Amino acid sequence: MNPTTCFMRTVIGREELQTPKLGLRPRCRQLLFVLDGKLSVDQLRVTMSGIADVEGTLQDMLKLGLICAAGETSASSAVQHTAAPVQQTTAAVDHHDDLADKLDQAMHHSADSGNRFEDAKHHAVDMMIALFGAKSSHVAKLAQAKDKSELLTEVSACKKILSAVASSSKAQSFEQSVMAALQN
């Protein structure tokens, strides 16, 4: 990451500060709050010294569409920017304001095609769409997984993001529900 890059909140980031939905950790919310397009990554390291991995947190926020580099068009306002064609489900279409409701709905959505891998993949995709929207890069990677190994690799990456921006318990629930779908 370029140390001179300045980041600013997107529409999604501003909405998250006004009406918290993602369950961001306090330090992550603090960082999101100070991002005004004027502080560089180097300045943020000094200003936000309580955050051990400022760059990693910024990368996670970028992936979630909460921030963009100053001067760039907000990815959140470009609706045509979709990650990949993904089967839309009730969890993806239903836009609840409460993250817990979204997660609960996605976890209990069950498709039974008879193919455990495909069902688990769709389950993981549905959950990530419910939590972060269809434009998340991880949604596309989950949807494109060709085998169990690729799926588990991407589930692990998603778990890290969930742990960083939400909670370790939500991340653990996500991973466990995908593993349960693989074994059913």
Image (cartoon, helix red, strand yellow):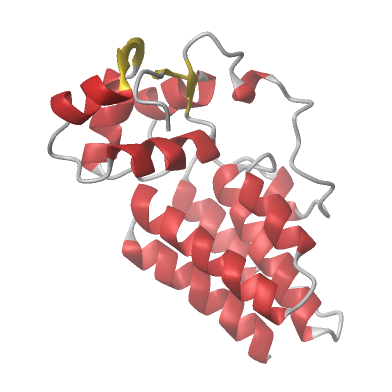
**Residue drawn where x is 81% and y is 80% of the image:** 112
Q: Is residue 61 above or below residue 71?
A: below
Lateral position of residue 142 relative to residue 87, left or right: left
Name the spot of residue 156 as percent of width and height, x first: 51, 68
**Residue drawn where x is 27% and y is 29% of the image:** 31
- Where, by quadrant of the figure, is residue 150 drawn? bottom right
Tell which of 156 and 92 is nearer to you. Answer: 156
**Residue drawn where x is 13% and y is 39% of the image:** 50
Q: Is residue 6 visible?
A: yes
Q: Is residue 3 above or below residue 156?
A: above
Lateral position of residue 41 relative to residue 89, left or right: left
**Quadrant of the image containing the N terminus:** top left
Q: Is residue 75 above or below residue 97?
A: above
Q: Is residue 151 above or below residue 86?
A: below
State how many labels appear. 0
Q: Is residue 129 visible?
A: no
Name the spot of residue 42 as percent of width and height, x first: 26, 24
Lateral position of residue 115 relative to residue 97, left or right: right
Tell which of 114 and 55 is nearer to you. Answer: 55
**Residue drawn where x is 41% and y is 63% of the image:** 170
**Quadrant of the image containing the C terminus:** bottom right
